[in-house]
Amino acid sequence: MHVLSLVNQKGGCGKTTAAVNFAGALAARGRRVLLVDLDPQAHATMALGWAVQDEPVLLEVLRGKSGVDEAAVAVPGGMWLLPASDDLAEFEEESGRLLNPESALRRALQTMSLEFDEVILDCPPRVDGVLAANALRASDTAVLVVETGAFALQGAVKALKILNKMREELEQPFEMRMLATLFDRRTRFARELLLAMHGRFGADMFDTVIRTSVRLREAAGLGVPVQLLDPASRAVDDFAALATEWLGRESCAPTAAPLDIPEGVHLHSTSNSWAP
């Protein structure tokens, strides 16, 4: 199991969109994928059409009152979601009274190490705080999502300084990658900024760039990954390329055909099986 956290220095850079549709692209390749919504705004949860009711959510997992297998639910696109609700912000407030609160997610995910190939963490729109600390301590790779817009490069450099400081404090530091999003190739500014980003970050940058797309906004509004909304769209091509690049980093063949799992079924349900 490889844990990736998608982080950024501010909102509006396409982080949640990247997390949801990267997970969808990996699931389409037969990967067993869990998406964890660590944002108190619960945007990833809403983007996959999940309405939290009385079932356990991420907050209960972080508090140790529920297991990942009890809280994870099957969602459109053949993947699993560990949903969030707006009361997730309470964990920031109560963390001062807890023992090692920044390691709660890592402990919970360790129990599922044989169940998933990738776990994608959609982080809050900040790189500090106890929720972000949970993500980074649980991560094998942190992906800094950077929009190709004004002041993005300066913001990315600032965020990297914070992330590198965190890495130095960990016994098992995470790897760093950068992903460019909201790219509009029609503008000279975006093209020049992308070149500058590659010049600044080098091999740490993904070659794949996520372009702006109306389909991505439409998919979020309908509560499905873009792979289900419009399989022939350029957005699907972008995330398929990202999945190919990610899986090509090592010998990482798909484990099975895409899972046919009923939406809304919990991971611990006896009606489910990981067998293809």
Image (spheres, helix red, strand yellow):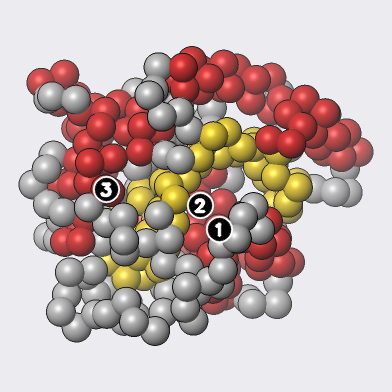
Q: Quadrant of residue 54?
A: bottom left
According to the picture, the residue beneath numbered tag 1 turns out to be 22
Q: Is residue 25 above or below residue 96?
A: below
Quadrant of the frame with the N terminus: bottom left
According to the picture, the residue beneath numbered tag 2 turns out to be 19
Q: Residue at x 35, y 42 (%)?
A: 38
In the picture, the disc for residue 117 is: none
Residue 120 x %, y %: 44, 51
Left or right relative to 165: residue 75: left
**Callout 1, which amino acid?**
Phe
**Callout 2, which amino acid?**
Ala
Q: Residue at x 70, y 45 (%)?
A: 206
Q: Residue at x 44, y 56 (%)?
A: 118
Say if residue 147 shows up in the picture. Answer: no
Q: Quadrant of residue 93?
A: top left
Q: Is residue 49 above or below residue 190?
A: below
